[in-house]
Amino acid sequence: MPLTARVKTFSLKTRLAELNIKNREVKKLIADELKRPLPCNISLQQLKRRRLKLKDQMSHYDGLLRTLSAMNPNQPPHPQR
């Protein structure tokens, strides 16, 4: 595999890991807000939108990684989430 493809794969995996961390953080914020006696609907709506955007981005990067691994049969396949 050429160096540029390895670098792209590495940076995509790094970005996907960062998005997973952010997704967990937002998920915790949503859970914390729901535990409050009177949750703020506006805050919940914003947090859920943010989480949905993160999930969309994660799906996009996951697809890119799958495409790269399909293009190079010597590379181990991208693991399922």
Image (cartoon, rainbow, N blue to C red):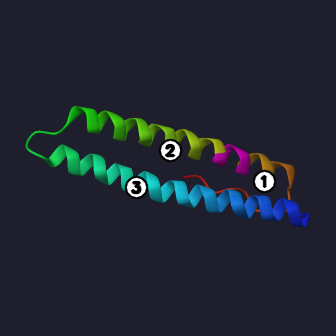
How far is mark 1 from mark 2, CA to CA? 22 Å
- Assess whether residue 74 is covered by the magenta stretch: no
- Residue under the image location 32 percent in, 33 percent down: 45
* SS for dot 3: helix
Judge the density around disc 3: few (<14), some (14-19), many (≥20) Cα neighbours within 10 Å. few
> Type of residue at label 3?
Arg
* In the depicted structure, whether residue 25 falls above or below residue 51: below
Residue bearing the label numbered 2: 54
* Residue 56, image quadrant: top right
* SS for dot 1: helix
Q: Position of residue 62 (x, y in %)?
A: 64, 48
* Residue 52, image quadrant: top left
Task: State whether residue 75 appears in this view.
Answer: no
Q: Nearer the viewer, mark 1 or mark 3?
A: 3
Q: Report the predominant secondary structure element of the magenta stretch.
A: helix
User: Which of the marked residues, 2 or 3, is nearer the chain's N terminus?
Assistant: 3
Residue bearing the label numbered 3: 24
Q: Nearer the viewer, mark 1 or mark 2?
A: 2
Q: Is residue 80 left or right of residue 63?
A: left
**Which span of residues is magenta-colored?**
61-65
Residue bearing the label numbered 1: 69
